[in-house]
Structure formats: C-alpha cells, structure tokens
Amino acid sequence: MEAVEMNSVSLKRPRSEDDVANADEIKRQKILEKSKAGNDSGQSIENVTEQPADTKSEIIPNEDSEEQEEEELEDSDEDGDPESFADMMKHGLTESDVGITKFVSSHKGFSGILKERYSDFVVHEIGKDGRVSHLDDFSVPVDDEDPSEETFTVLSDEDKQRLEELQLFKNKETSVAIEVIEDTKEKRTIIHQAVKSLFPGLETKTEDRDGKKYIIAYHAAGKKALANPRKHSWPKSRGSYCHFVLYKENKDTMDAINVLSKFLRVKPNIFSYMGTKDKRAITVQEIAVLRITAQRLAHLNKCLMNFKLGNFSYKNHPLKLGELQGNHFTVVLRNITGTDDQIEQAMHSLREIGFINYYGMQRFGTTAVPTYQIGRAILQNNWNEVMDLILKPRPGAEKGYLVKCREEWAKTKDPAAALKKLPVKRCVEGQLLRGLLKYGMKNIISAFGIIPRNNRLMYIHSYQSYVWNNMVSKRIEEYGLRAVPGDLILKGATAVHIEEGDVDKYTIHDVVMPLPGFDVIYPKHKIGEAYKEMLVADNLDINNMRHKIRDYSLSGAYRKIIIRPQNVSWEVVAYDDPKIPLFTTDLDKLEGKPLPVLPTDGKFRALKMEFSLPPSTYATMAIREVLKMDTSIKNQTQLNTTWLR
C-alpha cells in the first residue's frame, strides 16, 4: 500500500502575506520536507464528533441571574449571515497548518456537504459492554416509594418561585409558609413530599397560624444541603444512581447537563457520563444522576426543547469518563459528486484499510490564534505570551463583544477596562481578565490558574496533538503504510520497538506513535530524530517534559496511527428537497414517524454511511478520507452557504 499526497481541492484561496510569514509554518517547513500538498482552502471545523475526554470543558454551574443573562446573550449573538461568516473564516487554520496532509487510499476524491443539517450527523454511544445506546423506552420503573403524580402539580408557580429563592439563598427569608387550602392529612402529606422532592436541601413542618394550617419550608443544613441530595429520603433497596439515556439535538453534553440541573434545581456535579458529545448533531448517550428519581426525570420530557430522556434504571454506581468502547456514527453527506464506482472504492478502502488517526481540526480552535500556540507558550514558561495570545486582537470570526474587549486590552492593558466591554465573563478571556484583576499583571501564572483546569490542560494537549499530527505525516511520507524496524507497537500498555527479525509479524494497524512527554519512548528511526528537531525548533527539550508547575508536566501517551472503523455500511440515496431527513432517528421511531419517502431519481444524491470508532478518534478524519477534500467550516460554507442555521 502506498500513501497518497493530499490533492488540492477545487475551492482554493491565495495565501496572504501573513499566512506565508507565519512563524509556525516556517518552523514546520524546516522539519517536514516541503509537501506537495496544496490544500489551502480549508479552515477548522467546530464540534464535529465526540470530544476526547481530555479536551472537555469544565461545567460552570449557572447559579445566578447574571449567568442566565450571559447564556441568553451567547445564544442570541449569532454569527451573522453565512456569506460574511465564510469570509471571516479565511483567517482560520488549514488542515496542513496542523500537520494533516496525507491520505491512505488511492481512489479519486469527490465533494459532498457535511452537516448541511445537524440531523445529518447522529452519534450513538457504545458502552463498555459493547451495547449501543438507543432511546427506545419512555416508561418509568414502578416504585411504591415514588411520590404521587399530584406531587408535581400541588404547588403553585408562585410557591415554586419562593421555594427556589429560599433553596438558592436568593433572599433574606429563612423559611417559606405555604397555606394548606383544602386541609386534609393527605393534602399536607403531598405538599411535604413535593417540597422535599422538588427542592433538595429543604425540610418541612406543619404549623397552626390563626386557625389555619401552613406547611413551613426551611433549610435543613445550611448551604451544603443543596449540593448533597437528601440521603435519608432515598429507599435503601433502590440503587443510588438513576441511569438514563439522553437524546439531544444541537446542544453539547455540558450545556445539556447545565439545563437539566437548572430544571431539577440541583448542582451539575451530581451528573456523570462516559464521554462528551458535540453540539451540531443528534447524539444519544447514557447519563447517571445521584438520587433523582426516574419519575422526576421523565417529567422533564414535557418541558424541555431538543431533549428526551428515557430507558431509566437504578444502579449502585455512577458513570466514569472514558469507560465507553466508542461511538457509532450515522452520517449523511449531501449533494455528492462522486460516481458509484468512486464511492464504492472509497468506502471499501475505509472498511479494509481505514484512515489516518489525525487529531481533527476542532482540537486546535476556530480562530486565527490556534490553541496549540498557547499550549506551546505554557510549556515554554512564557507567561507574557500566554496572556498576549489569549487577549490580543485577532482577525476572523468572533462575537462582537469579544472584539471590543480585545481592542480595549490592546489600547489600555487594563483588565478592569477590558472586562467592562465583556458582558459574558465565563469565557476564557473573561476568566483570565478576572485573574489579572485579582492577582495583578506580575502574577500571570496565578491569574491563568483561575481558568478551569480542564480548559488550561486543553492548550497543552493541543500542542501534543499538533506535534503528533506532523510526525505521523512525516512517518507515512518516509516509510509508507507498512511496519518497519524501529516503529513502536504496544504489548499490553507497554510500548516496544519492532526489531528487524520481527517486522513481518506486524502491520501498519499495529503501529503507534507517541504524544511527547516524559514517560514515553520514541521510534528508533528518522522520525525519532524528527520529534527532537521539532521540539528544539519550539525551544523545548524532548528529554525534559516536566514543568515546574505539576499540572503542565506532560507524561505523554501512545496513539495508533491508522484506525480501521468497525460495522461499516453505506448506501447512496436520491432526494429532491434539501430539508427532508434521509433516515429516521430514535425519537422518530418512538413517535411512530414513517420513513421518509424518497424519489428513485431525485435532483440530488447523498451518501449515507455508518461506522463505529473507538474513543478519542475523529469521525471527520474518516469522512475526509472518503471525500479526499477538506472538512473545514470555510470549505463547507463555500459548498453550501446555507448550512449554518
């Protein structure tokens, strides 16, 4: 098998002087021989597949009205019309900027539109037992100890508002009194149950006042009670965790959990999950929540948009990040131009050979300042550059308030003044500015530390990914698609070199490459030296990847260079209406919606493909191998300027 250079796509743009002068491109070209790959048309694509666990953002609970206003502002600040967005994206990254330059298949590429509709991209989680998550049951497990249905309707909206304010310490009241209008023991019992189940952390008692009965709600144990669901009210025979399947449309996992926690009036940290799923897709995954009944969760189906919860069960354990086997994807590529023969060749190659396991473009951000540059500055201990890269003005697609904030920072270098221009303060820029305000301009390390840990680590992981992509392209360019002496393979969790006499025992599918760190070994051929040269060019020492701040010390890891998807299938379908769905979802099936009726000879053709991938691999990189074209936002918006909706 021979590796194939990336072909230029038809939608090219001339490189600007800034692009040519880009220091990273110059450094990379010193190490990687000049590639024949031209693909200058692509920029980064955001939120395309499951985000690997180490890139997930930390959940920031929405605890007050200011944060709710920020959410509304973020939602309302659209990117503008698609044409202006595409024009702004010309400042973003190309695939070759982050080392993505090779293909493994020999077929001729063709074009297609990825995610013309978010419903064209469906992700089903695969659990550690190999079971694919599906939403196919809305029923609630029968439990004699569950409160009655009347529990959810007995309180008035005004009562609920007052109780929520009491629960969240939003006023000075120490209790809330609810008059019992139809005074019976049964009615009082239902009100007691309603308060305790809907507002964790509150206790109740009955009092006589002026000849009338009142239910008095008050705090059980101070502010800690809100974070810790009531233990004594949970039946001992029932598992402490309610597991359920979350079906969501066009919302990422952390946003979904924040919404659920808001409706349930609990902290987001009582939810657990195995992997984060992206926004612009329909995704189905398992979630676990501590001591919230299936009955309460099922009631959310009546009031939530773009969410459905089902397949409830009680278990004694939460879920852990990374415990999944992977994800099953159903993807529709619309308006394809390939012949039937091209499509067959492409899909057979994907099934039999696979694709290069590159880190996808969403790993590196969507603006003119890639996340790997910030990660490199952290590893260099160059904190002024970290601050500058995050806060300085940058060209390209950004929300208006961020542009004003950056301009103010460039003009004044005053954190307080820049913060005033930033109504949304939960973003990285806002968090860093708050840190600078708190710790001062001479203590950037502490100021940067205000940013949630996972977000900070995302930057250095991005740099590791940047190095890995470049080195894998160099490895395939140098040695092709065969195992060679000096390559690395895994024996259990330990990496070992392939010796000359054993080379015939292994294929390219066995070969791994290291993400740089202090606890990995490197190939014993030209690529081992190329790693060292690339880090030297970035003023880093490959033999000293420990950082004086422990969080930023990189231990490294190993990653397979070729992934062969499982359960690959495909079909070409014809259609006339670009807005018609081309397959039924779990929710469609539950609601009894029929299969879409498609013409036998429509104006357009679409490729519907299904495949399963292990965790931390990027479906866009599999799709890129099929199309042989750039999967970026810019290129896709040029193909169809109406997909951003």
Image: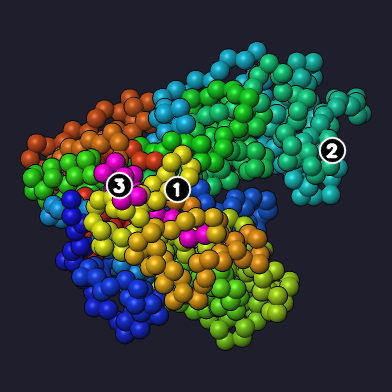
* Marks 2 and 1, the one that precedes in the sequence: 2
Q: Is residue 33 above or below residue 331?
A: below
Q: Which residues are magenta?
A: 499-517
> In the rendered image, which residue does mark 1 sit on?
495
Q: Nearer the viewer, mark 3 or mark 1?
A: 3
The total number of labels drawn is 3
The residue positioned farthest toward the front in the image shown? 501
Q: SS for tag 3?
A: helix
Task: Tell me the number on the disc at residue 501.
Answer: 3
Q: Nearer the viewer, residue 503 or 158?
A: 503
**Quarter where residue 441 is shown:** bottom right
Task: Determine crowd level at label 3: few under 14, some 14-19, many 20+ residues with C-alpha closer than 10 A.
Answer: few
Residue type at mark 3: give it.
Answer: Gly
Query: Which residue lies at the image location 31% right of the left edge and 51% below the top edge?
Result: 500
Residue at mark 3 to residue at mark 1: CA–CA distance: 17 Å
Q: Quadrant of residue 581?
A: top left
- Please state the horizontal and vertical placement of residue 551, each as a whole percent of the image: 63, 59
Q: Is residue 437 above or below residue 335?
A: below
Q: Residue at x 57, y 70 (%)?
A: 378
Say if the magenta span includes residue 625.
no
- Measured from the top left, where is residue 228 in percent x and y? 74, 37
Instruction: Tell whether 52 sits left or right of 300.
Output: left
Q: Nearer the viewer, residue 166 or 344?
A: 344
- SS at mark 2? loop
- Of tags 2 and 1, the one toward the viewer is 1
